[in-house]
Amino acid sequence: MKYNSRYIDLIFQKASSDLKAESRRGTLGLLWWILEPVLYVGVFYIIFSLIFKRGDEAQISSLLTALIVWKWFDSSVRQSSMSIVNNTGLIRQIHIPKVILPFMVVTTSAMKFIIIFMVLIVFLISTNGAPTAFWISIPLVMFVQLVVCLAVGCLLAALVPFLPDIRMIIDNGMTLLFFLSGIFFNINNVSSDLKFYLYLNPMVGLIESYRLVLIENKWPDFNMLFIIFIASSFVLFVAQKILFKYDREYMKVL
Amino acid sequence: MFKKKLAIQLKKVAVSYKVRASFFKTSKYWALNDVTFDVCHGETLGVVGRNGVGKSTLLRLMAGIISPDKGEVINNGVSVSLLSLQVGFIQHLTGRENVVLSGMMLGLSKLKMKSLMNDIEAYADIGAFFNQPVRGYSSGMRARLGFSVAYYAEPDVLLIDEVLGVGDADFKVKSSEALKKRIVSDETVIIVSHNVNTLRELCDRVVWIENGAVVMEGDASFVLDAYSQSNKDRRCNKKQII
């Protein structure tokens, strides 16, 4: 138990240190935490609303919500898949349980997500009106997404050092998932036999939940959230088993 | 003679690395074959050997960074760490911030690091730079700060790879003196080196490693004499061949 609390402290110390370091990199500092995601959604805003002239205000809010939620998943997965490989220097010098490396990365992106999510909330309130009681379910949706990020992140972190070639698959796989996550379409407009396969991607259900709550002011589908939670907890359990089993082997293959 | 308490035991330890030979084939390279020895509390143990005989692998094994493929490493409840400098340093953070992060990586609590802060600051002796980002440091200053954190981390067993002194000339003297003081005291230290003179000066006992196995183990001067002799023989043989 003593060890656990030591590592939890370390995860948060590392995450906040990384954020601090990042904010000092440019001249604009802290502003980049907000500017970077604003630029990111700005690109899609320009393409969809100004060039293709698609969508009214509600559709724009729904697109922004999905993009911001996706960004957290995307950066967590991409960075944690490389978390052991990128820390070769560190794990050569000291013994550190490898499982905490993807946790550090996911925590950093979670902190960034919280900041930009606040901005999104302000935007939604200013365009769609005051928040409703349904919004209290948002922390639950976020928690399920956190577990999903950790599960996928840890699993890939555990495998990439042994199978470096899957990096290419991860890169392109994430791009494919980006287009299949229902960011640019509503999952309910898809034919029902295809729907099942799309739901295998947990981000489809999560993005739908965020939209239900924030845009349509309804409760999320609790059954679906529960299934996503159980499935990703299982993956996370397996992934940390692998990470612990090969904890002292990673150094030999890097 | 009183019986000494064992800190770490290595029993018939072997470690291999995978080497990719072709697309489907990987061959194994055995860095250590069959190594057995004990480390007792309070002693200073030297490990001597030529380049590439598995000395660094041995240190990583004892530090718990890697596990053996065969045999076992028994740690009798001691904290072991390599004297490693600048663990986890982030370039854009200040010296002060890096001290906390680095110390926590080495296994100390945040609270402990804060209480050690003044000592570390004084020991590193880099003035106002302590509160500035590390990326602006000279390599000498970086070494000073790195050493100060590592020095104050105080594991039960300290592993030293080759170098004693770090930094500029002044600090090199200061840091190697500090380490020597610690080595001479009751602390458990393991030094890996191919420098016979350093080991002769500091160690009680020496293990000689060759081709991933122990050739000889025992009293420092006895083993080091044999090691030097074998090096001489080797050089003579080479000359004759030429």
Image (tube, coloured by chain):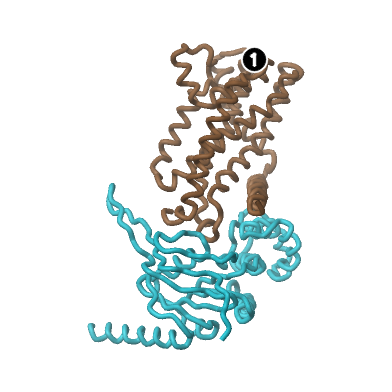
Chain colours: A brown, B cyan
Q: Is residue A151 left or right of residue B238?
A: right
Quadrant (top left, top right, bottom left, bottom right) of the N terminus of chain B: bottom right
Question: What residue is shown with label 1?
Answer: A58
Q: Residue at x 67, y 32 (%)?
A: A116
Q: Nearer the viewer, residue A237 or B203?
A: A237
Q: Residue at x 52, y 77 (%)?
A: B45
Residue B193, relative to residue A82: is it above or below?
below
Q: Amino acid at mark 1?
A: Ala
Residue A21 visible to the viewer: no
Q: Nearer the viewer, residue B140 or B4?
A: B4
Q: Nearer the viewer, residue B15 or B175?
A: B15
Chain letter of the residue beneath label 1 in the structure image: A
**SS at mark 1 in the image:** helix
Q: Residue at x 70, y 71 (%)?
A: B123
Q: Is residue A40 left or right of residue B236?
A: right
Image location (x, y in percent) of residue A14? 64, 49
